[in-house]
Image: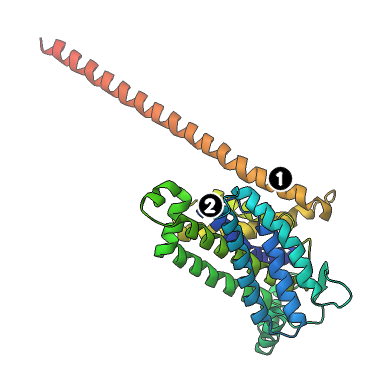
Amino acid sequence: MFASLFGAFEQGIIFAIMALGVYLSFRVLDFPDLTVDGSFVSGAAVAATMILFGYHPAIATAVALIVGFMAGCVTGLLHTKGKINALLAGILMMIALYSINLRIMGLTTENSIGRPNIPLLNAETLFSKFKAFLAPLGIDNALNQLLSMMGVRYLPSTWATLFIVAIIVIIIKFIVDWFLKTEVGLAIRATGDNKKMIRSLSANTDTLVIIGLGFSNALVAFSGALFAQYTKSADISMGIGMIIIGLASVIIGEAIFGTKTIVRTTLAVIVGAIIYRIVLALALRVDFLDTGDMKLITAAIVICALILPQYFEKRREKARKARRHEERLAERNFSLNKEGNAIVEARTNK
């Protein structure tokens, strides 16, 4: 139980970076960007290919981020300069990235042009390097001994993955918070709210959309690069349904923590991604469910996240109305009693 929840927590933090990217396109820019399904794999494919070629995992991850930015910019160009519908532009880019990703991974083999997957079983990754750095410090043993004293039986092999991903996510969260408060970030937020109004102020909304989509897909590709190193493989089908997972994380986080400020909303998205993975892990422990039911469980989680907040909001609104009605009745009875007492006093004085 603890091992599966620990793994779900690690994956949730990695997917939180992707969810932040989806939040930027879906909520901030109000752009239904399906490029996510392709750019996530692009990040994984670029990172895995470069690692196999002997590049440092940090450099491979950084290049994956740049490739994701470029993919997002192309989607933005198709929409703004090519005047293609936003949904269709994302779909076209997603389809194009499928072939591009095959070719990227195909660079690691001489037998064919394309390659559907790359194993990284014996390759050095960011996580293995951080694990080697953390091992002499004895932190893993100390934490596992603490868990053993608490009665936990299945202990994690390393805490390095959790630590390094948590540090990366915190840094990215602060960068996103800072970016959305800069002049460009505020203009992008305003473009998502009301594009016509921003155009009337002589702002170039096309550039803002391109930058916003580039930033969004850069985060998605970065998440894909980390996930490939976490799972020790890159696969052409690993991006299927990523947009749904990202949306589920955003919706769950917003439903629980609200969206009053940017800082609170980005934190909500991160926590939403973690909650989503934990709920998924718990659901898969049910006997009659199988790993093949993941998409069905994802759909059920998203539906619940969309419907339950509306249900509870209606209940709260009904309770507020009932409370206001009771207060009005109490005030009315009080004034009637006051008038009645005044009449009685007047008759008594006569």
**Quarter assignment of residue 333:** top left
Mark nearer the viewer, 2 or 1: 2
Q: Earlier in the sequence, mark 2 or mark 1?
A: 2
Question: Could you say which disc has been placed on residue 27 in the image?
Answer: 2
Residue at 53% in and 72% down: 171
Residue 102 spot, x, y in % from top left? 79, 67
Residue 276 spot, x, y in % from top left? 66, 55
Q: Nearer the viewer, residue 120 or 271?
A: 120
Residue at 50% in and 54% down: 28
Residue 157 spot, x, y in % from top left? 75, 77
Q: Is residue 103 above or below residue 198?
A: below
- 51 relative position to 249: left or right: right
Residue 160 spot, x, y in % from top left? 67, 78
Q: Is residue 216 above or below residue 64?
A: above
Residue at 42% in and 31% down: 323
- 286 relative position to 76: left or right: right
Q: How is the image coloured?
A: rainbow
The answer to whether any part of residue 271 appears in the image is no
Q: Is residue 342 above or below residue 303?
A: above
Residue for badge 1: 300
Q: Which residue type carries mark 2?
A: Arg
